[in-house]
Amino acid sequence: MNRFVAIRWTLFVLSVTIVGTACRAPKPTPTGPERVENPDLGIAIAALPEPFEVVANQGAELRLTAPGANGDGNLEIEVGPDESAAINLPAEAKATQGQFESMPNGEYFGNLEMVAPIGSAFTARGAYDGDDGRVGEIRVFALHPTQSRLLTLSFVYPEGEGKERMQQHATLLGEIEGLVPTESANDSDASDD
């Protein structure tokens, strides 16, 4: 009799385990960081770093936001026109001095050279009175990864968060890569003729 009870008990435990396992919802597969592509700008953000979120990504507009201790920071990525002449990144960064100083109570804090996976980049930092109070701004100037164009990342944030925002900016810059233009099906059909 003991053996019969033991077998029934074992079968009961097995059936409960099987039913419990079958009814359990599958664990979601982690998707990892979001890849953001903008064909009009010819760039991609390989893995959007935290805490950035995409606000706009349409046409030649790519804007991100990132929360901070004193409020959100807003970052805009722009690509200049095709350049036949060499692009002077240090001169681009230095030219922002006059722009920062012409803003209400504008200050220019200087520029630095950075090394990123896409090559050398130059920063310019400043602060000024914005519509909602005092803000800091970091602009990063780099060469477009696949074209002869100026790539500019402008990050405006509440004043007093410069160190944190510079780190976020550098992390984002490290994720930028060029998009290789692809042929559409119609283009490839036309080349077969």
Image: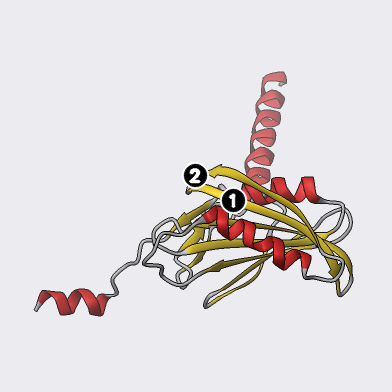
Find residue 11 and report its image quarter: top right
Residue 123 picture location, percent across and down:
64, 52
Q: Nearer the viewer, residue 107 or 34?
A: 107
Left or right side of 141 for 126 = right
- For the view shown, which residue lies furthest in the left direction? 193
Q: Which residue is drawn at 77% across and 65% down?
A: 101
Q: In this view, does 120 lie above or below 85?
A: above
Reading the image, the residue beneath label 1 is: 122
Q: Which residue is at a point 67% across and 29% down the rendered structure image? A: 10
Quarter of the image with the N terminus is top right
Question: What is the secondary structure assignment of the residue under circle 2?
Answer: loop
Q: What element carries label 1?
A: strand
Q: Mark 2 points at which residue?
A: 117
Q: Is residue 29 above or below residue 5?
A: below
Q: Where is residue 33 in the image (x, y as percent from the top left)?
A: 60, 52
Q: Earlier in the sequence, mark 1 or mark 2?
A: 2
Residue 108 lies, in percent from the top left, at 76, 57
Q: Quadrant of the C terminus?
A: bottom left
Identity, as a three-letter code, of the amino acid under mark 1 = Phe
Question: Horizontally, is 140 left or right of 69 in the view?
Answer: left
